Amino acid sequence: MNIYHRYLQLPFTVKKPDCFEPLDHAEIVLVDQQYIDTRIIDWIQQHSVKVSNLIEGFYTPTNGGKIPMHNDTPTLCNATKINFTWGPNNSVTRWWRVKQPEYLKPVKPDNRHISAVGLEPDIVVTDAYTAREEDCDLVHEQVINQPSLMNIGQLHSTFNPNMTEDRWTLCFTLLKLDGTHLQFEEAVQIFKDYIHE
């Protein structure tokens, strides 16, 4: 079973936030509530799922731009986000599996974009993992050009080969009502009526 990605057909269309402007390098930004289409959060919460207060945007520049390999959680798991991506139809998200456990490297993410505004995230953002591509097997690759369920507890990266069109992604971390991460298998069941190939 593909435990990494599913396209979603939502009952509304989301436009790219006005704050998503071209940058000169790969970047993670905090997205202020004023730029969030409230229909997204309302729709998610109709399914007895919460959205983390940490809503981020990821920028992948043109001409081979990348967001390096990482996961978004302090352990390897199947935590899930709903992502909206605007960009070329040849940019991809890639999921990876380390060939040997010792190739998995703990990392302390750079969270300056969070601390700068004084946000207290309701999820752990201080610990994650990374690895080198040569120490991993590519297990899934997907063009993300539609709303998508994304497994962000596994190692993943982005790649944008397009020479002229950059890529922005808006990310909503899905939580159970008790505040723990919604796992991908659970998300597939909860949102099954909206999944399409």
Image: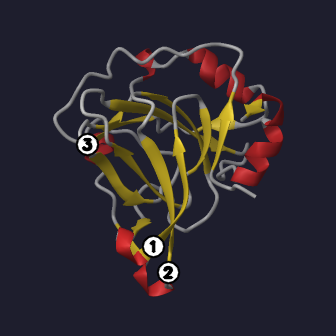
Query: How far across and down, in percent of the image, does residue 165 sit?
Result: 30, 27
The CA distance from mark 3 to mark 2 is 27 Å
Dot placed on the residue nearer the N-terminal end, 1 or 2: 2
Q: Is residue 19 left or right of residue 14?
A: left
Query: How far across and down, in percent of the image, does residue 17 sit?
Result: 40, 18
Colour convention of the picture: secondary structure
Q: Residue furthest left?
A: 24
Dot placed on the residue nearer the N-terminal end, 3 or 1: 3
> Mark 2: which amino acid?
Lys
Graded by Cα atoms within 10 Å as few (under 14), some (14 to 19) or many (20 or more), the crowding at tag 3 reads: some
- The label number, if any, that marks residue 26 in the structure image: 3
* Nearer-the-camera pick, 51 or 28: 28
Mark 3 against mark 2, which lies toward the viewer? 2
- Give the residue number, with chain letter if any, for mark 2: 99
Q: Residue at x 69, y 28 (%)?
A: 44
> Mark 1: which amino acid?
Cys
* Nearer-the-camera pick, 9 or 71: 9
Whether tag 1 and tag 2 are in contact, CB under 8 A, the answer is yes
- Give the residue number, with chain letter if any, for mark 1: 136
Query: How far across and down, in percent of the image, does residue 59 sit?
Result: 32, 36
Q: Which type of secondary structure does the marked residue at label 3 adopt?
A: loop
The CA distance from mark 3 to mark 1 is 22 Å
